[in-house]
Amino acid sequence: MSAQIIDGKSISNAIREEIKRETADLLEKGIRPGLAVVLVGEDPASQVYVRNKAKACEDLGFYSEVHRLPADTSQADLLALIARLNGEAEINGILVQLPLPKHIEEKAVIDAISVDKDVDGFHPVSVGNLMIGDDSLLPCTPAGVIELLKRSGVSPAGKRAVVIGRSNIVGKPVSMLLLRENATVTIAHSRTPNLPAVAREADIVIAAVGVPKLVKRDWVKPGAAVIDVGINRQEDGKLCGDVDYEDVLPVAGWITPVPGGVGPMTITMLMQNTLKAAKRAHGVG
Ligand code: NDP
């Protein structure tokens, strides 16, 4: 028996079609969701991400604007731009592409974004709302993980979930979301002893580590759902995840490939957040 492969691209496309339909309805009411993306410097990967985000907006009928700032932009200038975008009615979401150049304090920038426009879900108030269980804009990659599970027929309720990784952008928020979905959640990290045995207890394994092919077959309980958030560049230039896909495929019940699993969901969830922020701003839905 081999795992059911969770096709992130097709799930992502299905969600984008839903967003497109909702956007068309909003456009008829004179409402156009708008996203501002801010890129500081010329990091090649960031440039690709920003292009993809602008393209996704265009495909869905959103308004978007990209602010490309030089690498030596001062923190004060960046904060001034965010303050201006916070006040602009046609902008419902603001995304500052990370990482930022070293002379800019990431936290100051995240804190400056209006919570209502925090489509990355990184603002401390958004994080707090997630923790409390209040309605908020959810961080995109963790929200994408939950969507992949649900749309593949894997309900987290009552399941044992092990999240490997405790970063603020993936590990911690995805753990909170799984808890909210009534899973029993263990958060593992680099100081967790006997990690393979811990992972083997899980019905759902989420790998968000940044170590290529860390999760092997003997880490996975037969039939478990394995969601691989990792994106690692190998020596041959190809991408691989934090899960040894070929090794785990025969034992898992469900598995996400890399690329084509979690990756496509992140921008889609960003679009969903922008739509949600637009609806909220106009008091609809
Ligand atoms: P971080 O480096 O911020 O966090 C990695 C986490 O993994 C840390 O909590 C660390 O533990 C833990 N860890 C590291 N090595 C080990 C190990 N050997 N055993 C157990 N735990 C370990 O990474 P991110 O959360 O930002 O990203 C994780 C991966 O997901 C990366 O590959 C990244 O590229 C990818 N990613 C993919 C996205 C997507 O859109 N698909 C979006 C964001 C990230 P400790 O805290 O103890 O140091």
Image: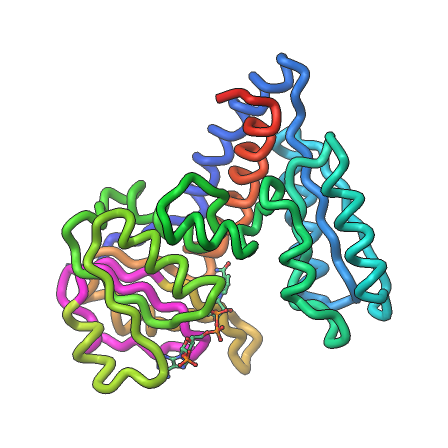
State the residue in front, 101 or 266: 101
For the image, the number of numbered tags is 0
Task: Reply yes or no: does residue 210 show up in magenta.
Answer: yes
Which quadrant does ligand 1 occupy? bottom left
User: Residue at 73% across / 31% down in the picture?
Assistant: 90
User: Residue at 24% across / 86% down in the picture?
Assistant: 193
Measured from the top left, where is residue 247 in percent x and y? 27, 73
Q: Which residues are magenta?
A: 202-227
Vertical arrangement, residue 156 with respect to residue 190, above or below: above
User: Is most of the magenta stretch helix, strand or loop?
Assistant: loop
Quarter of the figure with the N terminus: bottom left
The answer to whether 249 appears left or right of 60 in the picture is left
Measured from the top left, where is residue 107 in percent x and y? 63, 65
Task: Reply yes or no: does residue 214 show up in magenta.
Answer: yes
State the residue in front, 157 or 242: 157
Quarter occupied by residue 237? bottom right
Measured from the top left, where is residue 83 in percent x and y? 77, 47
User: Residue at 25% across / 70% down in the picture?
Assistant: 248
User: Residue at 73% across / 76% down in the picture?
Assistant: 102
The answer to whether 21 appears left or right of 217 in the picture is right
Vertical arrangement, residue 89 with respect to residue 55, above or below: above
Vertical arrangement, residue 214 with respect to residue 27, above or below: below
Vertical arrangement, residue 78 with respect to residue 207, above or below: above
The answer to whether 195 appears left or right of 230 in the picture is left
